[in-house]
């Protein structure tokens, strides 16, 4: 059960960080990518594969944090769809 709570925590963290993109297209892409990846592997039962997915997810979270920071520093004007 520890893996389940860790996976859920990682999922929530990735979604929260994805929402931080200023750019509409980046934000929606990141959210969609996180959801799709987790749905793709939701029935995984092998503990070793789950552990490797968690490690990769944590690396992706760190990368996502850097990307959102850069996106917010060098942001663009809002799109019409965002108004």
Image (spheres, rainbow, N blue to C red):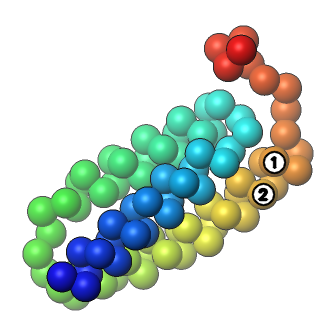
Q: Secondary structure at mark 2?
A: helix
Residue 16 falls left or right of residue 7: right
How packed mark 1 is, by other alpha carbons closer than 10 Å (few <14, some 14-19, many 20 or more), is some
- The structure residue drawn at horizontal position 78% and vertical position 48%, both measured from the top left corner, is 71
Q: Secondary structure at mark 1?
A: helix
- Tell me where residue 24 sits by quadrant: top right
Please tell me the numbered disc located at residue 72: 1
Q: Is residue 3 visible?
A: yes
Please say if 66 is above or below 36. Answer: below
Q: Is residue 53 visible?
A: no
Residue 15 falls left or right of residue 51: right
How packed mark 2 is, by other alpha carbons closer than 10 Å (few <14, some 14-19, many 20 or more), is some
Measure the alpha-carbon separation of dots 2 and 1.
5 Å
- The structure residue drawn at horizontal position 11% and vertical position 75%, both measured from the top left corner, is 45
Q: Position of residue 62 (x, y in %)?
A: 62, 71
Pointers 2 and 1 in contact (C-beta within 8 Å): yes
Please say if 20 is above or below 76. Answer: below
Q: Position of residue 29 (x, y in %)?
A: 52, 39
Identify residue for label 2: 69
- The structure residue drawn at horizontal position 33% and vertical position 47%, both measured from the top left corner, is 36
- The structure residue drawn at horizontal position 34% and vertical position 77%, both measured from the top left corner, is 6
Q: Position of residue 19 (x, y in %)?
A: 59, 45
- Tell me where residue 47 sits by quadrant: bottom left
């Amino acid at each position: 059960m520890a893996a389940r709570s860790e996976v859920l925590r990682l999922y929530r963290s990735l979604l929260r960080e994805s929402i931080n993109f200023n750019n509409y297209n980046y934000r929606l892409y990141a959210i969609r990518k996180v959801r799709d990846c987790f749905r793709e592997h939701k029935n995984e039962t092998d503990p070793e594969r789950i552990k490797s997915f968690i490690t990769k997810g944590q690396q992706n979270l760190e990368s996502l944090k850097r990307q959102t920071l850069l996106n917010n520093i060098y942001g663009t004007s809002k799109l019409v769809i965002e108004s």
